[in-house]
Amino acid sequence: MPAKKPLLTPVKREDFKENFSAGAHIGNVQPQEHFAPVIEQIKKLAIGNYFWFIADAVKGMGVSVGGMMEKMVAIKEDEFLQHPPDLLFRRGHPEDMARMFAFTNHWISFFMGLSPERRQYVRPTMYIRMMNPNDEYKWVMVQYVDQILNDAGMIIYGLTLVTDISHIKKEGVAMMSILDTYDDSCQLFFCSDGVALPDTDTVLPKISQREIEVLRYLAVGYSSKQIAAELKIAVKTIDNHRQSLLRKTNTKSSGELVAYGINRGYI
């Protein structure tokens, strides 16, 4: 008989915090300067209202924030920077927070099992509900989009993007995907409703890094011509990538393709 899939037990806040301490030497790093190009890309490729923040993983504090935090979750930027990220967690749906802490611990275990040179290619995405200024829970996508590692391969700063996807996702349970783009190939791992899906159970289309770039531009409504101009390649090449993506993902339209990308953490 096949082995049972491991269960992810919801985690209490204090247990999560114990596991999420990097305890790593920082050195002379300027995170705002390092992440600036990525933040500019976020502005171009956002698929809904969003905010981003840079966190110091050693001190457990935010160091910079931008976007629409107050509009989305009723937290002022200066207030966020004066408190640990717990302030943001408290806006999350209670059911989803326990799962999110479990997901994050699972990701840390996955991350630490990789070689230091491979860790920079791993990106987790979580889908949870957060309370808006009207005290309504709305679905958001939480992406750890970039990170700064020390020489030992430990995270010292991370850039997180939180996007309102309530116009796309309206129901379901909290879930996480882990995207691994090492060696220009993509592996996708899921944790959904408390169950960790091992990589052997995950059917993965072989989507290249370039195809992911095209998919992200499609998500914000770019045409093939516009994408070609951004990536400085031929329009026909973009069209070929689009057809390849439709075939690999078994989708029939750009709308289905974008939904596929969002649900699986490619966007």
Image: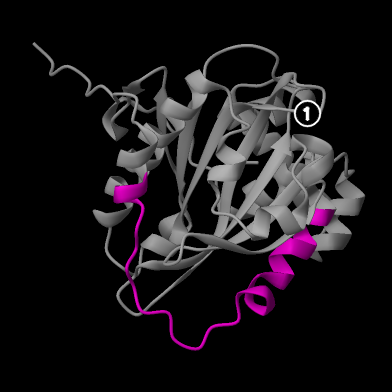
Q: Please identify the quarter of the rendering in which residue 261 is found.
A: top right
Decide which of 240, 222 is in the foreground and name it: 222
Decide which of 98, 7 is in the foreground and name it: 98
Q: Can residue 25 be found in the magenta stretch?
A: yes
What's under tag 1, amino acid-wise?
Ser
Q: Which residue is the extreme one toward the bottom? A: 28
Say which element carries label 1. Answer: helix
Q: Which residues are the magenta region? A: 17-43
Q: State the residue at coordinates (79%, 64%).
A: 40
Q: Please identify the quarter of the rendering in which residue 6 is found.
A: top left
Q: State the residue at coordinates (13%, 19%).
A: 3
Residue 83 placement (x, y as % from top left): 59, 55
Q: Please identify the quarter of the rendering in which residue 99 is found.
A: top left
Q: Can residue 124 be found in the magenta stretch?
A: no
Residue 117 placement (x, y as % from top left): 35, 69
Decide which of 31, 85 is in the foreground and name it: 85
Q: State left or right for residue 9 relative to residue 228.
A: left
Q: State left or right for residue 158 relative to residue 75.
A: left
Look at the picture and state if 2 lies above or below 219: above
Q: State the residue at coordinates (31%, 25%).
A: 201
Quadrant assignment for the N terminus: top left
Query: Looking at the image, can residue 233 be seen?
Result: no
Quadrant assignment for the C terminus: top right
Residue labelled with disc 1? 254
Look at the picture and state if 114 lies above or below 143: below
Q: State left or right for residue 26 relative to residue 88.
A: left
Q: Residues within 10 Å of mark 1 (few under 14, many from 20)?
A: some
Q: Which residue is the extreme one toward the left? A: 1
Residue 253 placement (x, y as % from top left): 77, 23
Look at the picture and state if 77 lies above or below 267: below
Q: State the residue at coordinates (27%, 47%).
A: 109
Residue 207 placement (x, y as % from top left): 54, 43
